[in-house]
Image: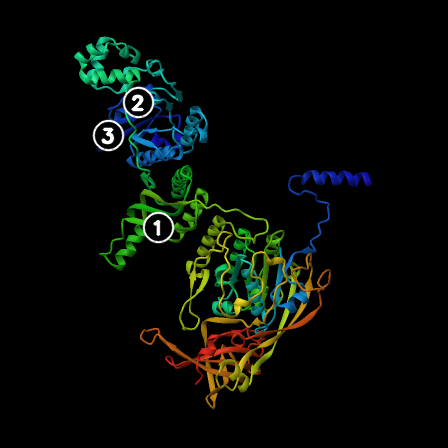
Amino acid sequence: MAAHFARLRSQVELALAGRVAAPFTYRDRNFAEHVSTGISEIDLLAGGLPRGAMTEIFGPDCSGRTSLLFSALSMRTAHLEACALIDGCDAFDPHSAEAAGVDLKQLLWVRCKNIQQTLRATDLLLQSGGFGFIALDLSDVSREVVRHVPLDAWFRFRRAVEDTQTILVVLEQESNAKTCASLVLHLEGEPGRWATSSQAREISGNTLSQLLRGFDVRAEVLRSRVQPVVRTTFRDGLAAASFSGRSGNFETHAPWNYSIGARSELKPK
Amino acid sequence: MVQAVVSSEPELRGCAVALVDGIPPLCVVVALNEAARVTGIQLGMSESQAEEFSGVEIRRRSAARERALHAALLDVGWSVSPRIENTSPDTIILDIAGLRSLFGAEENIASELMKRAVALGLSTHVAVAENLETALHAARGFSGITLIPAGEEATCLGRLPVHALNPSIEIQETLARWGIRTCAELAALPVLQLSERLGQDGVLLRELACGARVRSLVLAEPGICFVEEMELEEAVEDLEPLSFLLGRLLDQLCARLQARSLAAAAIHLRFDLGDFFGKEVQVQNEKSTEEIPPKIYEQVLSLPVAMRDSKTLLKLMRLQLQANPPHASILKITLAAEPALARAAQGGLFRPTIPDPEKLELTVARLASLVGDANIGSPELVDSHRPGNFRMGRFVPAREETQVRRKKRGGAADRGERNNSEENAEPQFRQTAIAFRIFRPEWPAKVDLRESCPAYIVFRGMRGNITTASGPWRTSGDWWREDGWQQDEWDVNVRLDFSGARNKQSLYANARDGLYRIYYDALRQSWFVRGRYD
């Protein structure tokens, strides 16, 4: 029997020679380089974003998905990596991204009109190679439409980024990529934080009854199939940890709270 | 002349080819190759006579191709030596003094010249001599590479027939009557008697035959004109055959650029058009009987980085033609390259990943054909207070030679990870900025006010109480233009009420409390939802 298996094995290896180097050698895909999202809480929670893998970030409206995306984009563009955003609903706001620190010159923005265009554009960008970060924004595409995206598309995306330095991030209302996503983050937004009139006066110099300060986000790691191989990018205590099932919070802040925003130049009625 | 045609139709290599020129039906044979000569065709024959010889390809003379081929020949010369003479359409003379350190011996220089000429589709003969007239006649008389050592000019040229020196018809006939057939026989004639019978022309001819004629090189001005033209005998209407022809021209253009160590920063494409397609003419007639579309079709393929890969350029050109096809058949194609220094970049193992420029340009072109030119690029903020104002620029990611630290405005300046080499450094975190998503176009809304503050809102089939509102932030501008604006913006927290929703499975059936930015447009006197904080 053993001789039979050995002969069969050698025949398979012979048939795949030139195409697959070692078909019976176990290839460990559980380790990948991770990069920071720019949000310390998320980095502690999930270990950052894995390169060469797909990350799925989902949640309802106003759950902080775009804030997390902009934070990650600002980190990658600050490293002069070429980034691309495939905008499924043409909802990207360059002003907001600039305020979040995104270097717009390093960003290729593709404004799509329907899901077919979005998927085709993603295929083209993944195949062209060389991008450090590719974001597929399906946040405002209806759940029914995204549910009907064939599973082979997600597999194709995963295969396209494998063994590359590209980070593929997908933003949705609910998780659809199943096992194709190496990291799945679920976000939930808390009610907005509003400044009182006295705080508003301090911030903007104007007398207001209220001023939006931001909102809190609760993040949960639903799936994490990869572990970071380096921990120098992150703060202490990340190595070889299992991230699945962990949750935490982070805060978003309106830009006029910490920088000179357009609002502070305006006069309220 | 024959080479010009053969270079544009490589399948004619090795065939008997005769070129005709003139006004039909009075076209006569003006040039032919050796294979055609063997069949019996002679110069001056009419086209109908030439057509009776089987196995001979008859083509029309192409002045455009001859010009392009001559330019290619000059490029070959300039790629080796900066000092060349533009002697005639089929001949150039190079000064190769001082090139030993670059190419080696004269034989190597000659080989290099032939190699470069072959790369451009030229079949050449090269001769090297101390005397430029000797080199000229040896190149015209002998095939392949001819090296003439100093002092052996007369011996080498002696084997050539007299007509290789290009004498006048009268002198040629006189010499034939004398029985003088070769240069050696001509060189043996006494100078004085020759002068008495043939005059100074005879003396000059004898000097040439001896290889003793000396003159200076007339230097040609180096040109940087890279134009390839092709006149089509039959008009082309479809993209596929057009791509085939464009590919040939681009191959030639890129080879010429490569010979000069240059690349193309832009390609100007020009078609001379023939008859307009019937459908288009009908449409034109419906619109206006007086409007006549131009007979020239022009496009410019601008490239973010100089490139000379003909395959990439052809793909880009195809995409551009698919987006803007010509509306008539094509009679003549002209391609002109704007030369620029080729990109020289040193990659690095530890540098961030950047798309290959040629590949990126191709991807962007494909995406542009998918989503439209206006929907792809790098967003640029406009110096204006108009809400949501921006423009799309060309996406040119920073490369290693331009990777300079750019100063960021406002809060972005303090962002962590600024250096190139800090990937391994611990990032510095700061507050996460709240992101905003825009609705394009904005959503119309109905808003109820309470004490001048929004209190209740209805939009896109949703309704809800506004629990908190911040504003109004009043902006206005461009009042002198038709598209001026005057708006009162509010940031609002909406507690959506789904109790009356008819279709809870709709897109927004699961929406919860949300932070929105709404505004009152004073000019349209309506409320709109600009976007959502996310």
The crowding category of the residue bearing disc 3, from other C-alpha atoms within 10 Å (few below 14, some 14 to 19, many at least 20), is some
Q: Position of residue B166 (x, y in %)?
A: 26, 20
Mark nearest the camera among 3 and 2 is 2
Q: Numbered disc 2: what chain?
A: B
Query: For the C terminus of chain B, which image quadrant?
Result: bottom right
Of all residues, the one furthest to the right in this rendering is: A1
Nearer to the camera, B312 or A23: B312
Q: Which residue is mark 3?
A: B27
Relative to B289, is A220 on the left or the right?
A: right
Query: For the N terminus of chain B, which image quadrant?
Result: top left
Residues behind callouts 3 and 2 on a single chain: yes
Residue B133 numbered tag: 2
Image: A114 above or below B272: below
The crowding category of the residue bearing disc 2, from other C-alpha atoms within 10 Å (few below 14, some 14 to 19, many at least 20), is many
Q: CA distance from mark 3 to mark 2?
A: 35 Å
Amino acid under disc 3:
Cys
Residue positioned 55% across, 78% down in the render = A213
Q: Of label 3 and label 1, which has the lower sequence position?
A: 3
Residue B299 numbered tag: 1
Relative to B243, is B202 on the left or the right?
A: left
Q: Of label 3 and label 2, which has the lower sequence position?
A: 3
The reply to whether residue B464 is visible in this rendering is no
Q: Dot 2: what SS? A: helix
Residue B483 numbered tag: none
The crowding category of the residue bearing disc 1, from other C-alpha atoms within 10 Å (few below 14, some 14 to 19, many at least 20), is some
Q: Dot 3: what SS? A: loop
Amino acid under disc 1:
Gln
